[in-house]
């Protein structure tokens, strides 16, 4: 099992019994967390997963050689880059379960501030890893170089994962209050996820600015994400969702907003093409 207490200690998280918290104490839209702190927190999770994997491998070899009990499976593949779903279910929920708190309530005060940007991201994408092609590493490097936008509103840290009754309405209100939505584009997956499309629609409806952050580690990567988008994206109707009712409601909202599903598709295509780098942006193609 992951050493949750060690992750909390290394991350500097506050003790639950030292925290006075009510979910109404800090409104959702005011819960911003430092991108740099979030990167370190997720790396501590990744390191803990690697330690468990190493121990399981030792136990596996011992089982083969000495007929000892076979080890239990490891929930986290050390090479997976810690997807959000794993971090929430295996770390954040058990870590905050005693008081049913959001992770935000345990983050040291110096790493909390009103957010500069709302982050829309796909839970299946890696949160952090050694390479730059992960959600938080992309944000940490890009936002710091573009000015004071390194305090993020991001769901797994700011939203109370023990209560999820009104997520759709909550996200719309938060995006309206913050006024800026950022999408880490390490691949084209966000355009195939229902909640990412919902947040994109909310930003459009409330007039929030929209930014896309590419994880280009070199000039040779330019145009890669747009190419993947052109290849992968067919329609918002293909977006993934667990509940059919959620998909029906969001598609109905898109149809109402844009006039039709094809027009919603065109809006998404134009947004991607206007914001993502193209092959023509490569340095050797510039005059």
Image (spheres, rainbow, N blue to C red):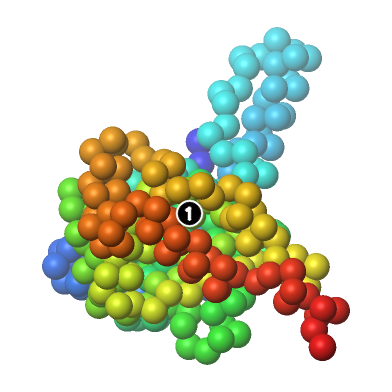
| Residue 230 seen in this snapshot | yes
Query: Which of these two is toward me, 97 or 225?
Result: 225
User: Horizontal placement of 86 versus 70: left or right?
Assistant: left
Residue tagged by mark 1?
191
Task: Please state the horizontal and vertical placement of residue 63, each as a whole percent of the image.
Answer: 70, 16
Examine the rendered structure and indicate whether residue 231 appears above or below residue 103: above
**Rendered residue at 39%/53% (across/down):** 262
User: Horizontal placement of 237 versus 205: left or right?
Assistant: right
**Rendered residue at 33%/77% (across/down):** 208
| Residue 160 seen in this snapshot | no
Task: Please state the horizontal and vertical placement of residue 161, each as a whole percent of the image.
Answer: 29, 51
User: Horizontal placement of 212 versus 194: left or right?
Assistant: right
Q: Which residue in the rendered view is the most extreme toward the right?
A: 284
**Rendered residue at 69%/37% (across/down):** 54
Query: Which of these two is toward me, 122 or 202?
Result: 202
SS for dot 1: helix
Label 1: few (<14), some or many (≥20) within 10 Å?
A: many
């Amino acid at each position: 099992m992951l050493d949750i207490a060690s992750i909390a200690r290394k991350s500097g998280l506050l003790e639950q019994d030292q925290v006075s918290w009510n979910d109404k104490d800090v409104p959702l839209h005011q819960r911003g967390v430092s991108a740099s702190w979030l990167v370190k927190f997720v790396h501590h999770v990744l390191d803990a997963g690697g330690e468990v994997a190493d121990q399981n491998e030792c136990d596996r070899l011992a089982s083969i050689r000495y007929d000892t009990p076979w080890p239990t499976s490891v929930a986290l593949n050390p090479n997976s880059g810690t997807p959000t779903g794993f971090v929430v279910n295996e770390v954040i929920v058990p870590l905050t379960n005693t008081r049913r708190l959001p992770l935000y309530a345990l983050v040291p005060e110096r790493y909390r501030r009103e957010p500069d940007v709302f982050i829309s991201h796909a839970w299946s994408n890696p949160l952090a890893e050694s390479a730059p092609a992960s959600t938080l590493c992309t944000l940490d490097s890009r936002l710091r170089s573009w000015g004071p936008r390194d305090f993020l509103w991001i769901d797994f840290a700011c939203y109370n994962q023990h209560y999820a009754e009104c997520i759709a309405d909550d996200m719309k209100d938060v995006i309206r209050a913050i006024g800026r939505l950022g999408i880490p584009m390490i691949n084209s997956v966000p355009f195939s996820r229902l909640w990412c499309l919902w947040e994109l629609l909310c930003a459009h409806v409330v007039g929030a600015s929209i930014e896309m952050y590419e994880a280009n580690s070199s000039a040779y990567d330019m145009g890669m994400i747009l190419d993947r988008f052109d290849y992968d994206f067919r329609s918002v109707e293909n977006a993934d969702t667990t509940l059919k009712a959620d998909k029906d409601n969001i598609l109905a909202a898109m149809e109402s907003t844009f006039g039709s599903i094809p027009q919603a598709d065109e809006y998404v295509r134009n947004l991607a093409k206007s914001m993502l780098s193209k092959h023509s942006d490569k340095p050797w193609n510039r005059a």
